[in-house]
Image (cartoon, rainbow, N blue to C red):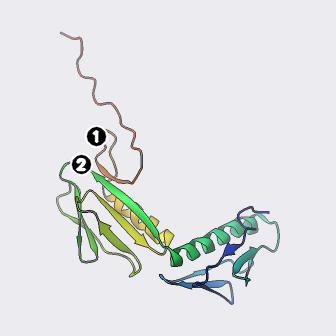
């Protein structure tokens, strides 16, 4: 039995969970509403302010879907109550971020600025005053992670000077530069 899958998901007071035909789960809370379709073979039940996911058999695909469905439902409940954030940092001379309306504009050593629009109304950007770091926040963990990866991909950190966009707390391993002509005449 999946250790993650068999744990029930606690539902706070301000959150409503609705399971429709075919395991279409809709979760509404103070920050918004999320909807996701799950494997129809799984049984998803809401009892006593808890969501329980059970699987019909011990087949490999049912075992895989069991823990995944429970984790996704837990992320949806967390998203509509507290939300998720992802912080990114910019390292490099002349590299900066700024906010124009709801859009994020990056100057990261390209011939042009790169502009990102939030994919949904639930996602927002917050740039710090120095322009060296910014935060992506919203209710859908997968969308925030995908957007952060896309932004990081515009200028990933390079291994010699460490210049580029990185996640907050990410360690970038630095390589030694050229050794030069030491000892030759």
Q: In which quadrant of the rendered view does residue 131 lie?
A: bottom left
Q: Residue lying farthest top?
A: 185
Image quarter in which the N terminus is found: bottom right
Asked if the residue under mark 1 is in contact with the one under mark 2, i.e. CB atoms within 8 Å, the reply is yes
Left or right of 11: which side holds 150? left
Front residue of 134 and 54: 134
Please tell me which residue is depicted at 38% across the width and 63% down the height of the picture.
Answer: 150
Mark positioned earlier in the residue sequence (2 or 1): 2
Please tell me which residue is depicted at 30% across the width and 51% down the height of the picture.
Answer: 164
Please tell me which residue is depicted at 20% across the width and 64% down the height of the picture.
Answer: 113
| Residue 107 can be seen in this image | no
Classify mark 1: residues with Cα within 10 Å, few (<14), some (14-19) or many (20+).
some
Q: Residue lying farthest bottom?
A: 21
Please tell me which residue is depicted at 69% across the width and 69% down the height of the picture.
Answer: 65
Q: In which quadrant of the rendered view does residue 101 lie?
A: bottom left
Residue 80: % across, % down = 52, 79
Residue 15: % across, % down = 58, 84
Residue 94: % across, % down = 18, 52
Residue 161: give its label.
Answer: 1
Left or right of 73: which side holds 48? right
Image quarter in which the C terminus is found: top left
Label 2 vs label 1: CA separation? 8 Å
Classify mark 2: residues with Cα within 10 Å, few (<14), some (14-19) or many (20+).
some
| Residue 77 can be seen in this image | yes
Numbered disc 1: secondary structure:
loop
Residue beneath label 2, please? 92
Front residue of 170 and 128: 128
Residue 175: % across, % down = 35, 34
Q: Residue lying farthest right?
A: 57
Residue 45: give its label.
Answer: none
Front residue of 99 and 157: 99
């Amino acid at each position: 039995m999946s250790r993650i899958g068999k744990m029930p998901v606690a539902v706070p007071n301000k959150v409503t969970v609705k399971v429709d035909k075919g395991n279409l789960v809709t979760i509404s809370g103070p920050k918004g509403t999320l909807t996701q379709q799950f494997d129809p073979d799984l049984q998803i039940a809401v009892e006593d302010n808890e969501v329980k996911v059970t699987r019909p058999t011990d087949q490999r695909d049912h075992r895989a879907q069991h823990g995944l469905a429970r984790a996704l439902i837990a992320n949806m409940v967390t998203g509509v109550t507290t939300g998720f954030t992802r912080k990114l940092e910019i390292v490099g001379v002349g590299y900066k971020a700024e906010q124009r309306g709801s859009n994020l504009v990056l100057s990261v050593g390209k011939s042009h600025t790169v502009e990102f629009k939030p994919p949904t109304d639930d996602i927002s950007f917050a740039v710090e005053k120095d322009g060296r770091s910014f935060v992506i926040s919203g209710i859908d963990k997968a969308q925030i992670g995908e957007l952060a990866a896309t932004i990081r991909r515009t200028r990933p950190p390079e291994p010699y000077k460490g210049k580029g966009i990185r996640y907050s707390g990410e360690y970038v391993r630095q390589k030694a530069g050229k050794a030069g002509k030491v000892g030759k005449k």
